[in-house]
Image: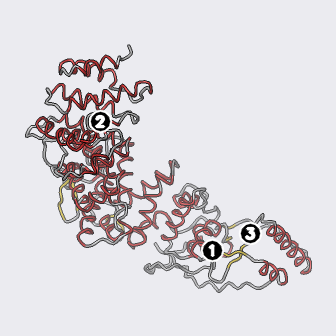
Amino acid sequence: MKMDLNAIIEQMETGDQDSALTALQSYNKEMNQCFTFSKEEEQDREHLGELVLGFLNRDLQPSCLLACLETVRILSRDKHCLDPFISRSAMLTLARYAGIVVDIPATPAHSHLVEGQVEGEGGDGEEAAEGSSETVKESSPHSENPDQEVIVEALKSICNILLHNETGQVVAADLQLIKGVAERMKQCHDPTWNHEVRFFDLRLTFLLTALRVDVRAQLARELHGISLLGNQLDATLGLCWPDTLETARAGFEGIPPEELPPLSRQQTELAMEILKILFNITFDTTRRKVDEEEAAEYRHLGAILRHCLTSHADGDERTEEFHSHTVNLLGNLPLACLDVLLMPKVQQGSIEYMGVNMDAVHMLLEFMERKLDRGHKLKETLLPSLNLLTESARIHRETRKFLRSKVLPPLRDVTNRPEVGNALRNKIVRLMTHIDTDVKDYAAEFLFVLCKENVSRFIKYTGYGNAAGLLAARGLLRGGRDSGIYSEDEDSETEEYREAKALINPITGVVEEEQPNPMEGMTEEQKEYEAMKLISMFDRLSRSNVIQPMQLSMDGKMREMTQEDMKKVTHNPLFPSQEPANSDSEEEAQ
């Protein structure tokens, strides 16, 4: 049976609470799972919204109050009918029921923030807002025993409004709702607040920080968001701190991470919301300098994130999602603070390398390989972990050597191309010719860093053909080494590689079967004739703009060949190579 919206409106217009309660309960039951709305009833829904807001500005029975807020939640799902809810007075009413109002001075500008305000406000919008504030204050959940169902319904409605309407976002920022939510988040150890209140506090904070740059900055700096949310994450995961920057699950101290019980569904939900908010407010961290106090906060946060990496949720999919948010946030931390990943003491069951605990790095590597094997949306799913491993390897010698031992072990197979096979090296080399430029560049950069940015070593493991893109971009096609600072390491060439080294084709990176020489039996004049013919063909294609011939300049970068260059080649096709002798060390780092 179709809901008669006009009958609901008629009952609401009587102003009687009992009639309104019966009508709204019927409407809410019918529409509870409705997320798409008919265009024909838009005006009626807007009118219903205005009537419900009028009720919310009165002193209501608890059951009628809850029914009104449930109706607002349902109506706020329709992005085309939000006008009644995006005025300053309407948002203030909802914020009071959510318990997140802060005292802020009124300004004349607030009265015309919204086009088409609620009927009755008109030019006295400011007065209407203040009047409604007085009324709501008496019945709002700002008491010792707040009705948490009311708070949750109000929070859900505000979240819907922010999600669908830019004006609502402006009003929410103007009302400083982030301050009210932050105040309640400080009570993270208080058992008063149930899971839903905590969750929708975080969801509202996420939306505000995702949609409003000013709110993002306000939470990060004025409200000390890193510390605030770090404490929230600490409390959610139930951590204790046996030592500086060392975490453990309270009640499970000394138990290896793999033996810990999985986090509950509620813990994981809250933790992921916190991680998303932290990602929003730390987005620009790697692009600016941080002072000592900020660095200490980031290290503390990094220690919690290390714990997240080694924790598990209820189910593989949920664990993967939890770890994805963790990795995304780790990528925002200042590079100097990533040393916290290596700080835990080596314990029984830990993965140790050079006396350092590599549990977190190993988890990151496994996570990266899983994303790589999945092959779905590599730019979004793979690059955060790949970039994090690259930067960690660049600044921490132990991390680089550990990753090198796993990704680029001493080369023994010289018969298969570097991109052929199921080893992790083969998978990453395949990415170096990926159609997505970012994926290609990140993959090459990772292997280049593991090779200590040494060109000859990089070519050895990838083949010149695969490496050419990065080398051209860096001006290293003539060989040499980039400007990175790395420690010296011992030679670890395998016997197999040393024996085959002279036979390896540097372009493909493997020993190939000997091919017949196409110029065998030709005189020097015939060879020169064929070369001239080839150059002439290139010249014709170049003049018709089919191709653009390039040549390697003395600085190691590619540049376009001019007509003058083509003439020089035509008159001297067999010029000697100007490439300097390769002085790169062939020593192998581990």
**CA separation in Å, label 3 and label 1:** 40 Å
**CA separation in Å, label 1 and label 2:** 84 Å
Circle 3 — which element?
Answer: loop
Q: Identify whether 539 is placed above or below 437.
A: below
Identity, as a three-letter code, of the amino acid under mark 2: Val
Q: Quick check: 416 left or right of 116?
A: right
How would you rate the neighbour count of disc 2 (Cα within 10 Å): few for under 14, some for 14-19, many for 20 or more?
many
- The residue depicted at 51 percent of the width and 58 percent of the height is 424
- The residue depicted at 41 percent of the width and 27 percent of the height is 37
Q: Identify whether 347 is placed above or below 454.
A: above
Q: Is the residue under label 2 in contact with that under label 3 (CB below 8 Å)?
A: no
Q: Is residue 222 visible?
A: yes
Which residue was labeled with disc 2? 118
Mark 3 or 2, closer to the camera: 2
Q: Identify whether 124 is placed above or below 473.
A: above
Q: Is the residue under label 2 in contact with that under label 1 (CB below 8 Å)?
A: no
Q: For residue 548, which numbered disc appears in the image? A: 3
Q: In which quarter of the image is residue 165?
A: top left
Identity, as a three-letter code, of the amino acid under mark 1: Glu
- Of callouts 3 and 2, the N-terminal one: 2
- Of callouts 1 and 2, the N-terminal one: 2
**CA separation in Å, label 3 and label 2:** 65 Å
Looking at this view, is 321 or 227 the one in front? 227
Looking at this view, is 441 or 220 the one in front? 220
How would you rate the neighbour count of disc 3 (Cα within 10 Å): few for under 14, some for 14-19, many for 20 or more?
some
Which residue was labeled with disc 1? 499
Q: In x, y percent, where is residue 487?
A: 43, 79
Mark 3 or 1, closer to the camera: 3
Q: Quick check: 185 left or right of 479?
A: left
Q: Is residue 250 visible?
A: no
- The residue depicted at 64 percent of the width and 62 percent of the height is 417
Identity, as a three-letter code, of the amino acid under mark 3: Gln
